[in-house]
Image: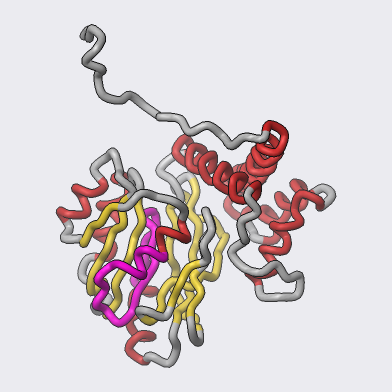
Amino acid sequence: MTPERAPVAVVLLALNEAHNMEAVLRNLDGWAQEVFLVDSFSRDETVEIALRHGVHVVQRAFRGFGDQWNFALRELPIRAPWTMKLDPDERLSDNLKRNIASAVRVGDADGISMSRRLWFMSRPLPVRQTLVRVWRTGKCRFTDVKVNEYPVVDGTIRHVDGDIEHHDSPDLDHWMDKQNRYSTAEAIGASAGMPLAAEPRVLGTALERRMWVKKHFHGIPFRYLGLFLHHYLLQGAWRAGWVGYAWSRLRCDVYRMAEYKLREIRLTGRLPLKRSIGPGQPDPRVPQYD
């Protein structure tokens, strides 16, 4: 049975996500009332694909995920009574679509949480997160952080069944490049003393406990062994065989990169250099050859 159309505006942020745009927009076709894209001046066909699908597209320079999401919620002409955050590399299961549509029709909460299941190397992992992704339009703001932004909903939250499938990257090369950028942003934010996504509390909510671990992670003995065991055993990545093992090890490497980059910033007193990746346009001042 095809999921019914939901009175939901889906908002996406993107930079060079052409490899995901066709799939994510086909996934939303016939279900979302409206779709918006805030593009950070992509160099690929991200905008062209979105426009071809009738998406409302705007462009704005990227300053951080929290800042970009708050801009989107503040400035986009959203008409739908409910708003949803979705990343270009995510897909909604039909079961989740039906349950979101049912929950917003009942309307007994101000926000809706759901499970996100991670896919890695084109394989599903038995690793799930509970995330708030839908809220009444105008009832949400985002924590103003560089990465790992978190929605703060004014009101009650209801959980619905069904998965968001998170197809993290098309290949490991892309994944490593993305994690390199994220770990740099984490290190820069930490060096500037920027606030975490939530107040760190060892006895608080699940998010507050994660922020407490994040704040004190650098001082925890055997922290990378403990992090690996958390991913591999407690989260159950071992059930995915070698792919689960590789993901668990690589997640530890990402934390290690962020820690080493922060130490480098403090040692050198400067931030990482911004680099241009890939070829640019020919320079008319010099000869050109085929």
Residue 25 is situated, as x and y percent measured from the top left of the image, at 26, 59
Residue 82, position in %: x, y?
33, 79
Closer to us: 189 or 147: 189
Residue at screen point 33% across, 43% down = 16
Does residue 96 appear in the picture of this structure?
yes
For the point 59% across and 45% down, the residue is: 188
Name the foreground residue: 231 vs 236.
Answer: 231
Q: Would you say 156 lies left or right of 239 here? A: left
Question: Percent x, y for residue 265?
Answer: 66, 37
Q: Residue at x 37, y 71 (%)?
A: 84
User: Residue at 35% across / 64% down in the picture?
Assistant: 72
In the rendered image, residue 84 lying in the magenta stretch gets the answer yes
Q: Residue 153 in the image: x percent, y percent?
A: 48, 78
The residue at the far right in this view is 221
Answer with left or right where residue 85 lies relative to residue 116.
left
Observer able to see residue 238: no
Is 195 on the left or on the right of 26, as rendered?
right
Q: How is the image coloured?
A: secondary structure
Which residue range is magenta in the image?
Answer: 70-94
User: Nearest the camera: 16 or 273?
Assistant: 273
